[in-house]
Structure formats: structure tokens, C-alpha cells
Image: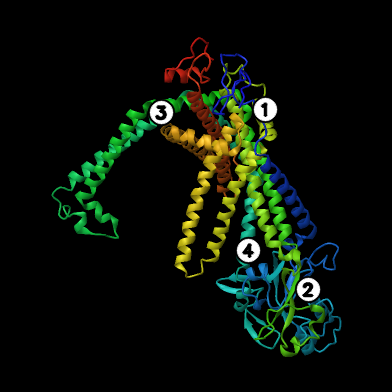
Amino acid sequence: MEDQAAGRKDPDGAYGTPQKYDPTFKGPIYDRGCTDVICCVLLVIAIVGYVVVGVVAWTHGDPRKVIYPTDSRGQFCGQQGTPNEKKPFLFYFDIVKCASPLVLLEFQCPTTQICVSKCPDRYLTYLSAYNSRTPSELEYYRHFCVPEFKNLQKAPIKVLKDKECPAMIIPSTPLARRCFPAIRAKKGVIMVGNETTYDDGHGRRRNVTELLEGAKKANVVLETRQLAMKIFEDYTVSWYWIIIGLVIAMVASLIFIVLLRFLAGIMVWVMIVMVILVLGYGIFHCYMEYAKLKGEAGSDVSLKDLGFQTDLRVYLHLRQTWLAFMIILCIVEVVIILLLIFLRKRILIAIALIREASRAIGHIMMSLLFPLCTFFLLCLCIAYWASTAVFLSTSNEAVYKVFNETACQFSGQTCKPETFNTSNVTKLCPDAQCLFAFYGGETAYHKYLIILQFFNVFMFFWLANFVIALGQVTLAGAFASYYWAFKKPDDMPAFPLFSAFGRALRYHTGSLAFGSLILAIVQVIRVTLEYLDHRLKAADNKFAKFLLSCLKCCFWCLEKFIKFLNRNAYIMIAVYGTNFCTSARNAFFLLMRNIIRVAVLDKVTDFLFFLGKLLIVGSVGILAFFFFTQRIKLVQDTAPPLNYYWVPILTVIVGSYLIAHGFFSVYGMCVDTLFLCFLEDLERNDGSAEKPYFMSPNLKKLLKKTNKGQPDA
């Protein structure tokens, strides 16, 4: 790669170094060209295909199939512009034939279903309504018959045989737009309305508990709906306090990042000392327990003689157990102390890099808000994927099947309602009905719907990973411009974040597409394995389950490794502008050559981020708990009345974690970028006039490095 300042090509192809120091030199991040163009073209083609799939799905799909219940003829209840516009509820002729509401909501009951304007509010049989002297009884009953039923003088036996009207109706309430029996318990007695028995329309009195099997989970649905309403009410009266809590979390996150610049060293060393002290106390406690058991009966039995015991407390009464604990803790203590002695300089370097990351973020404050852009793009990907999935799943045609109560050879076969009554099925199976079953189809489009759904999932993973990669490259480019500025911050571009974003899109869309494609393929394989595992749960093939578990574990590890490799490859792309494979290779071997520094920095930053998240989430969560439970006397009257105080508290805790995670993800990217730049700086430069160091004065002082003949930044 040819250097912008000196114009000399490095034989290694990494980046050109100037023959002599040039104040206009701004590091290796500016001279670049387009990379992985083929992958860029593939991404564009895939996006165009994804748009075509979305258009086709939106043309054929109908989300009303998810929203509105469907009668036995596949017509929507309550849909405007249809004959059922003023009939929003679904009524079942015989609810007893339905095993549970899950069958009603997802599949089909073997009974006639019609759309009605309101659910029945009384006990009534067709025979009693027909024989009633009040015409209004039969007229009321007719609302729960099929729309074609007009002849009120038709013999009741013929009406019931033709299944034009239900044999009986019972008091019902609408749940999920479906009429369920109004079941309630009064002093432990199950009742529907005010009755414990009902006439089934065939001259028999039956107990209402028989209705419970057909609607036993209706109360659960009702309670869930009531719970949802109470939670919604809590949000309406506490939303502004929740926002205040999230703002406090954001301010606390920002303050913690600023404090890391000054207190990182203190926090790390305090943590190390605490670990040593805790281990020391553990050794002391084990010795005291070992000494206390001396002379007690049974305490000198060896672990080998005791054997395996299910009650683990038995082992605590043996001296040998505490001796083993003490030896293990002593070994761990000695290992940690030796590591501290030999790695003390690397720990100091990690602390210095963390401090430097705070300075870099201080000069690029907009980077803290950049995760909002990534979040917005991810929301677009999720919304497009979800809407396309819904339209694809609802783009089938109505399929009718034969349903019957008794054994029938035609049961489950497809049928046509228009010709069903004249077919041989009704002659061989008198109780058979041609009812709407589900939405499907036999056309080529319907046959390939599963492939389109698979493509939809694959494109979601690809685009989501691309958005994340774009965010990582943008942040890495901005922070690299800080590191490679010889005079910080004077040599930095005016808008480093926007400049890095533009470079990423202009030159490296193909490389980002390549890295995200590899990760998407692995993730799709993992999703497929999870699906197969779900299907094999009921199987007894232990070898298949074992093999599947091994594959899931291997691909989980592979996904973690690819994410690690991609992250560092994106940093190298942002710094040098090389293609994905070259960047991944260079980043991997660079880290392997400095594996101890990588391990130390990784553990130190992990601890600091864990401490920061714990401190922020814990503090804000405790404050929210005391506020919403009205335990703070100063603001006791200010706290809103709530049905469930845990609703805003959990919302604040989860929101605080997401905010803290967003801040620390930027901080982590900054640390990783500066670390890779620091390693490259050490390997490529020697402090001479031709190859000056770009690291900060603190790092140069720590490593005892100097730039000969040139002023430090």
C-alpha cells in the first residue's frame, strides 16, 4: 500500500512509512481503494431479491388471517367491506367438541363455526325456542344459525340433522374474538351463568363441568388480558419517571467512562488486592476448619474410604476435605501472585490503554450516540423481516377438509364446500362436514413458500450482521484517526465519525458484506440445528440427540470465534483499507504474536465493564425500588400509585442495562482499536526520524520509548 505522505511502498504491503518525519502525515487510514467488490455486488443482488420477495409476499399475503377469526367457510369475522362486517365474534355450534382454546386459536374444531354480532347471553335449546309461544325466542335463536337458514317452520329434527342451527346455546363471553362459555366459580362450584346444569338440546341434562374441557383455559386468557391491562395502566402513570430513571442511567454511564480516565489504575489494583485478600481469607478459613476437626470422631476417614455420597455435607465433616481445599487455594494464590509479578508491566499497559480510550472518546463525543444509529438500522431490519414473514405465512389459500365425529375413511381429506353435499362423502359418512381447516395451496408459489421463508431468515441475519459490522468499522475508523494523529487532537479530521462512516460505505461495503455473510451462514446453521433438536425431542434415538448436541456446541464455538475474528478484521479494515481476508489474517497473527497482552487487556477491560454495568444497573435499580415502593420520605407523595410496582422497576433495570451496554460497547471498541493500533505501532515503528511512534506520551513513558529528534504529541 502506498503511503500518502512519503509515497514509498512497504515491501510487506502493510502501509508505507515516511522516509523522514512529515507534520502533514496523518497515519495509514486515508490511502485506500474499494475492497471485496464481488461480495458488494452479491449483497446488492441479494437486497434486490429480498425486495422482490417482500413485494411478492405483500401482494399475496393477507395479515387479516392472523388478526381476525375465520368461520367454517374461511370468511373473516368483523372485517370491513364483507358480509360479516357487523359480526366480529366467532360462535361454535358445540363448544364441547373442542379440546381446549389452543385448538380454537390455532387449528380447527370439528364443529360448525359462524360469525355473530354478539355472543349468546342465555340458556336456550332449539327445540324449546321452536316450541315457544313467543316468536322472539326463535328469532333470537336464528342469529346463531348459518346465514342461509330462513325457514323458521322447518322441522327441528331436519334443522339439526342438516346442522343449520346449534342444538343449544349457553351464556358466553367474547375472548380473543371468540365466544367462550361464561364459566365462573361460586363457593367452589363451577357455574355457567347461574346454572350448574344445562340442556344439550337432545333432551338430556348435563353438568356444566363438561363445558370446562372445551374452554378450560378461557379463564387463563382472561386473567392474562386483565394482567396486561393493569401493566399498561402502570406504564401510563409512571412512564415519565421511567424516562427520568433511564436518563440517570445514561448520565451515570457517561460519568463512569470519564472516571475511568482517572481511576482505572486504582480500580484495577483494588480489584487485584481484593482477590488476593479473599483467597487469603479462604486459606485461613480452611485451616481453621481443619484444625477444629482434629480429634473428632469420624473426621480422619479418607475421601477414598468414604466413597461417593449424595449428601455433600458429609464431606465437610472430614479433615481431608478442608486440607484439599486449603492446598487448592494456596496453589491458586501462588499462581496469581507469580502472574502479577511477571505481568505487572502488561497490566500497566492495559490500564494506560483504558485511560487513552477515555481521552479518545472525550475528543469524539458523538461516538457515544452512534449506537442509536445502529439500533435504528437494526429495528428496520427486524421490522422488514417480521412483516415479510407475516405476509409470507398468510399468503396461502383457504383449504377445506372433511371433519367428522365418528370413524370415516374420508376424514382429513380436502374437499370443496360447493359440491360437498352432493358428493359420496355425505352418503358414506352422514355426520361428516366440509370445514375450513387452514391456509395452504398447491401452486408453485405455495410449494416454494418454505424456501422464501428460509431466504427471509437468511437475509435478516446477513443484513443485521452487516449493520453491526458497519457500526464497528465506523467506530474503529474514528478512533484510529485519533491514534494515528501525531499531534492529538490537532491532526484529527474535523468530523472523524462521519469521515469513518463515509469511508466504510464508499470503500469497504464488500468487505463488510463478506464478513457478515460468513457469520450469517453459521447462524442459519445454528437455527436449523435448534429446529431439528426441537423436532427430535420426542424421539428416542439417543445417538442422534448426542450428535446434534455436539454439532450445536461446535457451531456455537465457531460463531463466537468468527465474531471475535470479524471484530478485529473490521478494525484492520478501518485502519489499513485491506480486504476482509487479508485484514482477518493480519489481525489474527498480530494478536497471536501478543497473546499475553491480549489476555491481560481482555480480562482487565472485562472486569471494568462488569463493574461499571453492575454499579450503574444496581444503583439505578435500588433507587427505582425505593422510589416506586414509596420508601423515600422526601418524595413519598410524588411516587404514582401502581398495581405492580415491579413493572416500572424492571423496565428501569432492563433499560439501564441496555444503556450501559451501549456506552460500554463503544468504549470496548475504542479499547480494541487503540490496542491493535498500539501493537502495529510497536512492530512497524522504532522511534526514529523515519519511523516515529504515534502512541501517546504516557504509553511511550511506560514502555521507555522516545521519538528521536522530534517532539512528542
- On the picture, is 49 further left or further right than 642? right
As drawn, the residue found furthest toward the top would be 709
Image location (x, y in percent) of residue 601 = 45, 32
Using the numbered discs, state the Cα–Cα distance from disc 1 to disc 3 in whole angstroms: 33 Å
Q: Secondary structure at mark 3?
A: helix
Q: In the rendered structure, which disc, 2 or 4, sits on the residue that comes first in sequence? A: 2
The residue wearing badge 2 is 73
Badge number at residue 499: 1
Using the numbered discs, state the Cα–Cα distance from disc 2 to disc 4 in whole angstroms: 26 Å
Residue 513: tell me if it is visible: yes
Single out the mark in the foreground, 2 or 4. 2
Image location (x, y in percent) of residue 394 = 73, 62
Single out the mark in the foreground, 1 or 2. 1
Residue type of the residue flagged with mark 3:
Ile
Q: In the rendered structure, which disc, 3 or 4, sits on the residue that comes first in sequence? A: 4
Q: In the rendered structure, which disc, 2 or 3, sits on the residue that comes first in sequence? A: 2
The residue wearing badge 3 is 347
Using the numbered discs, state the Cα–Cα distance from disc 1 to disc 2 in whole angstroms: 60 Å
Residue type of the residue flagged with mark 2:
Arg
Single out the mark in the foreground, 1 or 4. 1
Residue type of the residue flagged with mark 4:
Val
Q: Is the residue marked by circle 4 packed among few (<14), some (14-19), or many (20+) residues within 10 Å?
A: some
